[in-house]
Amino acid sequence: MPADLTQVLDVASMRAAEAALIDGGTPAQDLMEVAGRALGEWVRRLGAGRPATVLCGPGNNGGDGYVAARYLAEHGVPVTVIAARQTTTPEAFTARSLYKGEVQGAGSLPGGGVLLDCLFGSGLSRPLPNDLFDLLSGLAERHALRIAADLPSGIEADSGAVLNPGLPVFDLTVALGAWKHAHYAMPAAPLMGALRLVDIGVKSVPGAARVIQKPHVRSPAPDAHKYRRGLLAVVAGAMPGAALLSAEAAQRSGAGYVKLLAPAQPQGVPPSLVCDVTDLAALTDPRIAAILVGPGLGRSAEAAARLDAALGANRPVVIDADALTLLRPDSPGTAPRVLTPHEGEMAALEAAFGLAATGTRRARALALAETGQAVVLLKGPDSLIATPSGDVTVSPRASAWLSVAGSGDVLAGIIASRLAVHGDAHRAAQEGLWLHGEAARRCGPAFTAGDLAGATGSALSAALP
C-alpha cells in the first residue's frame, strides 16, 4: 500500500503510524535517516551554499537535525550544530554520534544563511522554557532564512495553539511523514511560511482528516440541457443584493439554470438571470435540483417563514448567512444540507442546537455536523469541512484578501451551484471551498466580491480535465 500524502494526523495517530512502520520491519533509525536527509536537502537547496545552523533538541526531532547536519557537511555546506539539551532517545543518540563535526552548547548564537529548527516537533504540549525560547528567537534574528522541522518549536500540533507568544516566523515548514492539524489551523499557520511534506512511508490511517484537493469537474454531457445540468433556486430576502451576488457566482460555477425567487423584481438583475416573481410558489417546481437560502434574507418573522418554505421543499440546500441564525433543530426538511457559518454564526448554531462551544474548531464543526445532520463548512482563515459521518477536510490558507464584504455570498453561490449539478453535499462543499480560493488567487490583491464572482468561471476551468 503506498504512503498517503493527503491525510492530516493528530499526535497519537502519528505515533501509532510510525510504530506500525517499525513493527512492519522498518528500523526507527532508517525513518530518521529519511527525514533528516530530506531536511538537509531543503536547507541546501534554499540556502544555495550559505552557512547553516541546526538547532537540535533532546528527542527524535533533534535526531533528525543531526542527520540533516551530517548530510549538509557531506555536501560541502558549512554547518554549525547547537545541542539545546542532551539527547534522550536511542535514535537521537545514534544520530548525534554519527555526526563527526563540532557540536556547540546552548549558549552559542551564531549567525548564518539558514536556521533549521529541530528543537521540538509535534509532541510539544507546554511552552518552551525561557532559555530555549530566547535561544530560538536569538538564532532566528541572526539568520536570513528559517526552516522548521515538522513544526516550529512552540506550536501545539493538534490544536494549532501558539504556546509561546512572540515565536519567530518561518519561511518554510517541512512536515515529516504526514500533515499535522497545526499546519492548517490558526493561530499557528501564519508562522510556518510555505509548507512541504517528506514522505517516510506512513500508510493511510482510517478516519484521518484530509487536505482539500483540486476537484475534478466534468464538462456537461454532449446532450446536456439547462435542467439536466442543474436548476438552482436562490431565495432572495430583505436585502436582495446579497442573493444577486450569490446567483452571479452560481451562474459561473456549473449549474445550467439559476433562478432568483423574489416577491418582486429587484433592481440590478442582470439579463442572464431569471427572476421568478411567483416567489416561493416556484419552490414546487420538481425540476429544482438545489436551493440556496440565507444571503440577504434578514432575521424577521417573514425571513424565518421564507427559510421554512425553502427547507420544506425538501431539495438539497445550502443554508448561509442570516438563515443560519434562524435555523433550529425542528426546522423542516430532510434533504442533504450544507451549512456555511463564520465564527459568529457558528456560535448562534451551537446555542440553537444545545452544543458546548468548546474544543478545537474541527471538534466543534464535527459536533454540529453530527447533531444537525448536515455538512458544515466552518469559514475563516482556517476554513474546514465536517460531515455527519465524521469526515474532516482542511484547507490551506487562502488569500487574506478574501476578507471582504460579500465574499461569503460568493462562496455560498459556488457551493449551491455545484450541489445543483450533482446533489452530493460533501463534494459540493469541497468543490466550492477550493474554487473560492482559486478565484481569489486569480483576482490578485484588493478585489471586490463582484470581481471574485466574476473570476469563478476562470477558477472552474482550472478544475476541468
Image (tube, grey):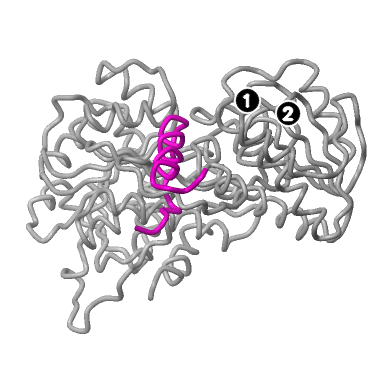
Q: Which residue is at the front of the view, 34 or 336? A: 34
Give residue 403's position: percent from left, percent from top: 56, 42
> What amino acid does circle 2 point to?
Leu
Which residue lies at the image location 39% right of the left edge and 73% below the top edge? Answer: 464
Asked where in the image residue 272 lies, by quadrant, the reply is bottom left
Most foreground residue, 173 or 185 = 173
The label number, if any, that marks residue 316 in the structure image? none
Q: Amino acid at mark 1?
A: Val
Q: Please name the residue shown 27% across and 61% down the image.
A: 258
Question: How busy is the neighbourhood of tag 1: few (under 14 within 10 Å), some, or many (20 plus)?
Answer: many
Q: Which mark is residue 167?
A: 2
Tell me how far mark 1 sits from mark 2, CA to CA. 8 Å
Circles 1 and 2 in contact, beta carbons < 8 Å = yes
Judge whether residue 286 can be spotted in this image: yes
Residue 399 falls inside the magenta stretch? no
Residue 13 located within the stretch drawn in magenta: yes
Residue behind mark 1: 162
Query: Which corner quadrant of the image does residue 465 belong to?
Result: bottom left
Range of magenta residues:
1-27
Label 2 crowd bin: few (<14), some (14–19), many (20+), radius 10 Å: some
Of the 4 image quadrants, the one containing the N terminus is bottom left
Secondary element type, mark 1: loop
Give the percent coordinates (x, y) of residue 231.
20, 62
- Work out whether residue 410 can be spotted: no
**Which is more toward the observer, 222 or 160?**
160
The structure residue drawn at horizontal position 78% and vertical position 57%, both measured from the top left corner, is 44
